[in-house]
Amino acid sequence: MNKKTKYDAVIVGAGFAGMYMLFRLRKMGLSVSVFEAGADLGGTWYWNRYPGARCDVESMQYSYQFDEELQQEWEWSERYATQPEILKYIDHVAKKYNLRSDIRFNTKVTKAFFDEKVNHWQIETDDGEKLIAQYCIMATGCLSSVNKPDFKGKESFTGSIYYTGEWPQEGVDLSNKRVGIIGTGSSAIQSIPVIAKSVDELTVFQRTANYAVPAHNKPLDPDQVRKIKDNYAEFRAKAKLTPTGNLFEIGKDSVTLDSEEERAKSYEKRWQAGGLPFLSAYADVMLDSESNRVAADFVREKIREIVNDRAVADLLTPKNIIGCKRLCVDTGYYETFNKDNVKLVDISASGIDALCESGVRIGKKVYELDVIISATGFDAMTGALLNIDIRGKKGLPLKEKWNEGPKSYLGVALAGFPNLFTITGPGSPSVISNMLPAIEQHVDWITECISYMRNKGFAVIDAQTEAEEEWISHVRDVADMSLRSTCNSWYVGANIPGKPRIYMPYIGGVPAYAKKCKEVASAGYKGFALN
Ligand code: FAD
Ligand code: NAP
C-alpha cells in the first residue's frame, strides 16, 4: 500500500457504498484512499455473520447494476442470498475491479477536520496516520454502529456475550449450550429458528413483539433468472419508479375499495408469496390506520394459527402499527416457539433487570445461561458518523450541528461541511428503500458533482443553510403524513437513550427524491455555494 499523505478523495468505509465510490472516482482519474475498520470488505455483510443472516430484498434486486457485464455474469443461487453468498459476490466485485489495492483495512478514521485556509480535509486514523484530501466521503453505513446496551452487571456474567452485528469471524459453536437472545428485531427473527436447532435451550427475551411475514425462500428458478437477465436494464428502470426502489406489484390505492373477503384474499395471496411485498397489498397501509389495522390483524391471526400455546401466541402478537418498525421477513420464526427447547420471556414491563454471574435476571427470576446473544440493533444512520470527530467550517463539530437531530441537504451534504458527502445519509430514502440502488444513486450523484466542479474549476462546494432547512422541513412534513413516524423505532432514534427523536430517512419515495437530486444538479447545484 502506497503511504501517500495527500489524496483527491478519502472514502471512509468499504461496504457496498465505499466500494462503488472507489470504483467511480478512480475511473475519473482521482487519487483515492479508502479506510475500513474491518479486516476485509463487505460492511454489513462482513460484520453480521450470525446464524441465518441473509438479505430480505430479493437477490436479483439486491445487487449492483452499474455494470451490465457484472450483473449478467453473477449467478445468485437463492431468492434471498445468504450472508456468505453476498460476501462471495462482494469478493468477486473486488477482484473484478481490483478494489482492495486502494483500501486500508483494520483502520478506523477517528477525525476529519475541514481546513478553511486551504480548503481540504485533514483526516486522522486510529493508527496515528494523518492525511489530507480535497473531498471526504462518508460511506460509513446506516447500520454499522452496533448498539451495546449497558446492562447492569454485564461484567459479572461468566459465560460469553455476542452481538449479532459484530459476530465473531470464526463463528461460534452453540451446540448443546443454554443460549439467551435479547431482542426480537430482524436479526433475532432471522437467527432464532436457526439457533434453536442446535442449542440445548433457547430463551428469547422480548421487549416488543414484532411483525414477521414468511420469506418463502427457495432456489432461484433458472428460467425466471434468464427472463430478468434478458431485460435487466428495463427491470432495474422499472424498480426505480417504485416508492422503495424494489420491483413488486403494489395493490389498490385503498383498502376501502375491497370487501372484507377480498382483503383477506389479497393478504393471503401475499402471505403465500412471501416477503416485503406483503405491505404493498394496499397503497394506503402506511397512511391510514384502518387500512393498517386490516394488515396487522391478518398477521395477528396467522400468529394465533401457527403458535400452539395461546399465552405464547398472545405475547408474540404485536400491538403496534405494522410496518412502523421495519417489517421482518422470517423462515419459521413463529413455528420455533412450538419447540420444547424454546422459551419466550416477556420483558416489556422493565426490560432486562440485570445480568448476573449465571445468566439474566428478570425480577427475582434468574435464567441460567452459557451464552447471551445481544440482537439489540444499531445506533442507526447517525451513529457511525458521530463516532468520528468531524468538524466543519469554524471548527464546528458535527455533534453540535446535529444536537437536535441530523440536518442535511438531500441526505448527501451538510451545510458548513464543504466537500463532505454522506452516502445514504439521514434525509435520503436510504434504509426505507432497497439500499443497493440507493447507494448507486448517491455515488453517481457525488461523482457527477465532483466531475462538474473539476470541469468548471470549482474547488469547494457547500450546501446553503436555507436549502438545508427547506429540505429538512420537507423531510419532516412527509414523515408526519405517514404512520411510520408514530412508533418507537430506530428510524426515529428511539432505540438509543437520549437520541433526539426525528424520523431520519426521507419517506417521499425514490422517484420524487431522484427527481429532486437531478433538478438540483441540472440547475448548477441549486442550493449549494460553489467557488
Ligand atoms: P456498510 O455495509 O454498513 O459499510 C460501512 C462500513 O464502514 C463498515 O464496514 C464499517 O466498518 C466502516 N466504517 C464505519 N465507520 C468507520 C470509520 N470511522 N473508519 C473506518 N471504517 C468505518 N438493506 C437492504 O436494502 N436489503 C437487505 O436485505 C438488507 N439486509 C440487511 C441485513 C442486516 C443484518 C443489516 C445489518 C443490514 C441490512 N441492510 C439491508 C442494510 C445494509 O446495511 C445495506 O444494504 C448495505 O449493505 C449498506 O452498505 P454501506 O456500504 O452503505 O454500509
Ligand atoms: P432492531 O430492529 O433495532 O431490533 C433490536 C431488538 O432488540 C428489538 O427487539 C429491541 O426491542 C431490542 N432491544 C434493543 N435494546 C434493548 C434493551 N436495552 N433491552 C432489551 N431489548 C432491547 O435491530 P436488528 O434486528 O439488528 O435490525 C436492525 C435493522 O437491520 C433492521 O430493521 C433491518 O433494516 C436490518 N436488518 C435486515 C435483515 C434482513 O432481513 N435482511 C436482518 C437483520 C437486520 P424494542 O423493539 O423494544 O426496542
Image (tube, rainbow, N blue to C red):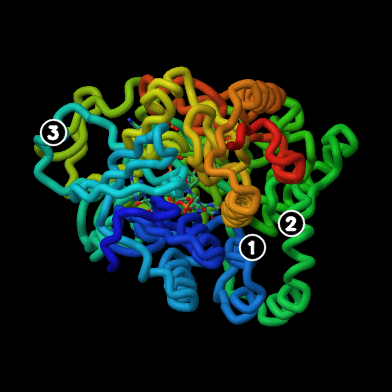
x and y percentages locating residue 8 in the rendered image: 44, 54
- Answer whether labels 3 and 2 touch (C-beta < 8 Å): no
Query: Tag on residue 438?
Result: none
Residue at x 43% of width, y 44% of height:
143
Query: Tag on residue 356?
Result: 3
Q: Is mark 3 within 8 Å of ligand 2?
A: no
- The quarter of the displayed image where residue 64 is located: bottom right
Residue at x 76% of width, y 78% of height:
230
In the rendered view, would you say 307 is above or below 526?
Answer: below
In this view, the residue farthest toward the right is 257
Give the residue at mark 2.
239
Residue type at tag 3: Cys
Q: CA distance from mark 1 to mark 2?
A: 9 Å
Q: Is residue 379 left or right of residue 262?
A: left
Q: Residues within 10 Å of mark 2 (few under 14, many from 20)?
A: many
Q: Residues within 10 Å of mark 1 (few under 14, many from 20)?
A: many
- The quarter of the displayed image where residue 107 is located: bottom left
x and y percentages locating residue 531 in the rendered image: 58, 37
Question: Which is nearer the N-term, disc 3 or disc 1?
Answer: 1
* Secondary structure at numbered mark 3: strand
On the rendered image, what quadrant is the N terminus found in?
A: bottom left
Q: CA distance from mark 3 to mark 1?
A: 45 Å
- Answer whether labels 1 and 2 touch (C-beta < 8 Å): yes
* Secondary structure at numbered mark 1: loop
Give the residue at mark 1.
61
Which numbered mark, 3 or 2, is in the foreground of this view? 2
| Residue 310 in view of the camera | no
Q: Is residue 473 left or right of residue 28?
A: right
